[in-house]
Image (cartoon, rainbow, N blue to C red):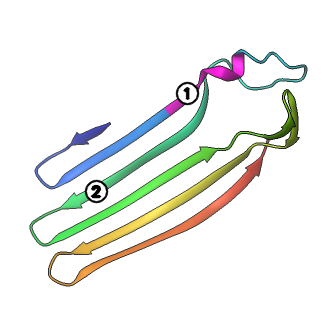
């Protein structure tokens, strides 16, 4: 979802809820009913010559399973921060960095 604050400034964000985790009632399950699997938000500035954007993203991967119902590798949460600068007359620069991974 994107919300324009004024002609040049905007914020955006989103959440993806994983409702399927409730269907698999495994012993030791610790996730709540509405588990946020993906979370992202950012802020951007744009005028006729320049665009600048900072965005945060956190995505969880599903556990890798060799046999159905048996998790082999744990789920991982990948977190990243993106900086983007676009100069219309010169080109663009993008940089992203991983903030960290967490095993579940």
Mark 2 crowd level (few <14, some 14–19, many ≥20, 10 Å Cα):
some
Left or right: residue 74 versus residue 86 is right
Label 1: how many Cα within 10 Å (few below 14, some 14–19, many 20+)? some
Q: Is residue 4 left or right of residue 31?
A: left
How far apart are the two marked residues, 2 and 1, measured between alpha carbons?
25 Å
Instruction: Judge whether 85 appears above or below 101 on screen.
Output: below
Which residue bears the numbered disc 2?
44
Counting from the top left corner in percent of width and height, residue 10 is at 24, 49
Residue under label 1, please give it.
Answer: 17
Q: Is 98 inside the magenta-drawn segment?
A: no
Quarter of the image for residue 90 reads bottom left
**Residue 38 image-quadrant placement:** top right
The residues colored magenta run 16-22
Contact between labelled residues 1 and 2, with CB atoms less than 8 Å apart = no
* SS for callout 1: strand
Helix, strand or loop at label 2? It is strand
- Closer to the camera, 86 or 23? 23
- Camera-side mark, 2 or 1: 1
Residue under the point 47% across and 45% down: 40
């Amino acid at each position: 979802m994107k919300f324009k604050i004024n002609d040049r400034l905007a914020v955006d964000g989103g959440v993806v809820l994983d409702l399927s985790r409730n269907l698999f009632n495994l012993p030791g399950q610790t996730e709540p009913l509405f588990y946020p699997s993906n979370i992202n938000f950012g802020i951007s500035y744009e005028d006729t010559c320049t665009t600048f954007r900072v965005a945060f993203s956190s995505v969880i991967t599903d556990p890798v399973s060799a046999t159905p119902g048996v998790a082999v590798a744990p789920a991982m949460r990948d977190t990243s921060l993106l900086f983007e600068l676009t100069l219309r007359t010169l080109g663009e620069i993008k940089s992203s960095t991983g903030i960290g991974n967490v095993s579940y």
